[in-house]
Amino acid sequence: MTAPADLAGRIRSGETAAEDELIRHFSRGITFLLRRVTRDPALAEDLHQETFRLAIEKIRRGEIREPEKLPGFLTSLARNLATEDARRGTRRDKWHDRDPERAEQAPDPEPGQLSALLRKERAALVRQVIGELEQDRDRQLLFRYYIAEEEKEQICHDLALDQVHFNRVLFRARQRYKDLYERRQHGFGAGPPPDRPRREHGAAAE
Amino acid sequence: MDHAYIEEHDVIRRYLVDRLGADERTRFEAHYVDCDQCLERLELEEGFREGIREVAAAGAARAIERGLFLRLLLSRSGRALLAAALAVVVALPVGILLMRNRELARQLAAATPPPPLPEPASTKEDQQARQERDRLASELEQERRARTVAEERLARAESPRVNLPVFLLAAVRGDDGTSEDLNQLVLTPGEDWVVLAVELALVEHASYRATLRTAAGRRTWSGDGLRPDERDTLTLALPSKLLPSGRYSLEVEGRTAAGRWEPVTTSPLRVERRE
């Protein structure tokens, strides 16, 4: 990818291809960030569009002070939009305030059928990974680390493990999960991952 | 921020569990949004973590359907988290034991010789078969004993509970080190669950986190995503084995709109176990 400062310069000089490149390069990371902040895929999708629309407007107008820090500019903008949205209340509420009869058309905060299916598949992969563990102690390790979010030192102490064993169990479990996940991805074909939102590149630059 | 720093400071995991400071988080976000390698690791780690939570939650849901106790006490998603982990930790080994038991039984059946022919002297093969059968029978017996123990544990976990110790904790602001006398929990043998309730003065956060610490500051338990009930009370059901005799504090924090945790209330408590 072009260096951030160059990319900003190209956008400022009106190069549409550079705008597409900006979206293409940073879309995945901004989506990840927004999904984490909002916990709502539909809202994250809206804010993703808004982030790139505003970012491109600001870059075009030369309002980005340090173009070499373009990634940080984008993440801050995305976070600020999410925070502002949360401060104003949920989108569903806003829709309802504006026009109660249209509230039903607001983005559904519940995950859709595809998300539910993907969650199920992910759980099936994890179930397989857990089922392949030979020792109950290793299963306990995973549950305590990922669910109770206990610290590594505490888990090692309670289960009488050394950190080498701990790291090995985690590494193998993650690696196995990755293998299974990638195998499943291949099963879907060579297209983009199904849980990644499809995006019209030109839409954000309107 | 570079990869050496990210590795050394366990940044990916700390980011996913919201334990980075604002500055470190900002720097990491600016890094990973431009780094395929970190993004891939984040997505993988988060997917794995959420998958484990799904598995645990499914186990908890089954347990809740079966158990009156769990239905009464674990109806809130935040409170279900610990029980979910416990349910899966208990249920998985039992299932595995049952499967292994069935497999051993099949092996034993396969190894059992047909009715002996009326031959006076046993052959070498007969002796080996008998030894194999004895070995399998011994293993089967061990598995049965282990299964019995596991089934007893599962039955205890699923059976309805009566007269659970329930403690309404008083909160303090500015603990002077003596106020845990306000909240004294006396636990007697056989009380393997304890219910702690904390009344919140104001409900002004969308989500709460509770952390139980020992007097030395060691975290004994923590759960987030908690929401108070309609009486503005957070109710936590904890296995009493988490609470040996000693002094503790239960800290409740609220999540701000900016995603930060800020203290809401702290309840010091003293646990006394009586024989």
Image: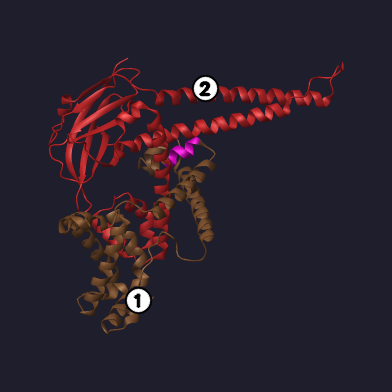
Chain colours: A brown, B red
Neighbor class of circle 1 (other Cα within 10 Å; few <14, some 14-19, many 20+) is some
Quadrant that contains the C terminus of chain A: bottom left
User: Which residue is at a point 39% across and 40% down the rendered structure image?
Assistant: B57
Residue that mark 1 sits on: A20
Task: Give the alpha-carbon distance from disc 2 to disc 1, as whole Å.
Answer: 64 Å
Check contact, mark 2 vs mark 1: CB within 8 A. Answer: no
Give the secondary structure at mark 1: helix
Query: Who's the residue at 32% across and 81% down the image?
Result: A16
**Would residue A68 be seen by someone viewing this image from the given angle?**
yes
Extent of the magenta region: A136-142
Residue B61 lies in quadrant: top left
Looking at the picture, tell me which residue is in the foreground, B160 or B258.
B160
Q: Amino acid at mark 1?
A: Asp
Label drawn at residue B147: none
Give coordinates of residue A162: x percent, y percent.
45, 40
Q: Which mark is residue B148?
A: 2
Q: Nearer the viewer, residue A163 or B171?
A: B171
Residue A106: tell me if it is visible. no
Going by the numbered disc 2, the residue's amino acid type is Thr
